[in-house]
Image: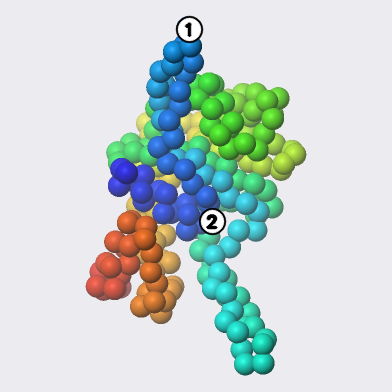
Amino acid sequence: MDPAVAMVRAYLQANGYFTMTEVPVMEALKGGSARMSTDLDILAVRFPGSKGIMTGAPRSGGRRRKDVDLKLQDPTLENEPDCLEFIIGEVKEGRAELNAAATHGRVMRAALKRFGAFNDKQVTHLVDDLLARGEARNDKPEARVRLMAFGSTPPEGKVRYEVIMLDQMMEYFSRIIEEHRDLLSIFNTKDPFLGTLMVMAKAGLFEK
């Protein structure tokens, strides 16, 4: 997996999203053949009320301690707590831009159908709004879909999608590590990006 994609995946997962990466988009051709159109770097969905918690351990007598909210949400994402959040994302190590292929209506349609939350009529409406302004809303289920680009430098000119910089994500990880430094000695993860961050943190590289 591309290291920048791994970083974005870890960032979105820490913020409560379920993710798919490098999702292929296929096109049906005449005669029953097909071709690869493009791939989507990241698809993500976050359910209302998602939180990262430490579950309360049992007390003597059978009662349980209260869960602890780890407060992992990054305000940069501007999530709305009461609706489903969907992200169709492009990841770049350089300029944060969407590929031309990724902004075709058929590609947006493939992404929305892969989520499986919307019927054909809703998908058509959502595609139109995404192409017009980079964000779309649905009533039933109550949902927001956003186009988002991640990269190390901003795009040129005005764009119709949201942009998050790689350094903003690193600032987020640094803050979370600092706020939860007491948990690092027992934290274990199989995620390669988060695992590398944890080793760096334990080595004191995030010390202020």
| 127 or 185, nearer to the observer | 185
Furthest toward the bottom, the residue is: 60
Q: Quadrant of the N terminus?
A: top left
The residue pinned by badge 2 equals 16
| Residue 164: percent from left, percent from top | 43, 45
In the image, is 59 to the left or to the right of 101? right
| Secondary structure beneath label 1 | helix
- The reply to whether residue 51 is visible in this rendering is yes
Mark 1 Cα shell of 10 Å, populated few (<14), some (14-19), many (≥20): few
Q: Look at 40% across and 72% down and name the residue there.
A: 187
Q: Amino acid at mark 2?
A: Gly
Q: Look at 45% across and 23% down and name the residue there.
A: 26
The residue pinned by badge 1 equals 30
| Residue 113: percent from left, percent from top | 59, 31
| Residue 166: percent from left, percent from top | 36, 49
Q: Amino acid at mark 1?
A: Lys
Q: Would you identify the image quadrant in which residue 51 lies? A: bottom right
Q: Please, which colouring scheme is shown?
A: rainbow
| 168 or 68, nearer to the observer | 68
Q: Look at 38% across and 39% down and name the residue there.
A: 91
Q: Would you identify the image quadrant in which residue 179 lies? A: bottom left
- Above or below residue 164? Residue 181 is below
Q: Quadrant of the C terminus?
A: bottom left
Mark 2 Cα shell of 10 Å, populated few (<14), some (14-19), many (≥20): some
Furthest toward the front, the residue is: 32
| Secondary structure beneath label 2 | loop
- Above or below residue 76? Residue 175 is below
Query: Which mark is nearer the camera, 1 or 2?
Result: 1
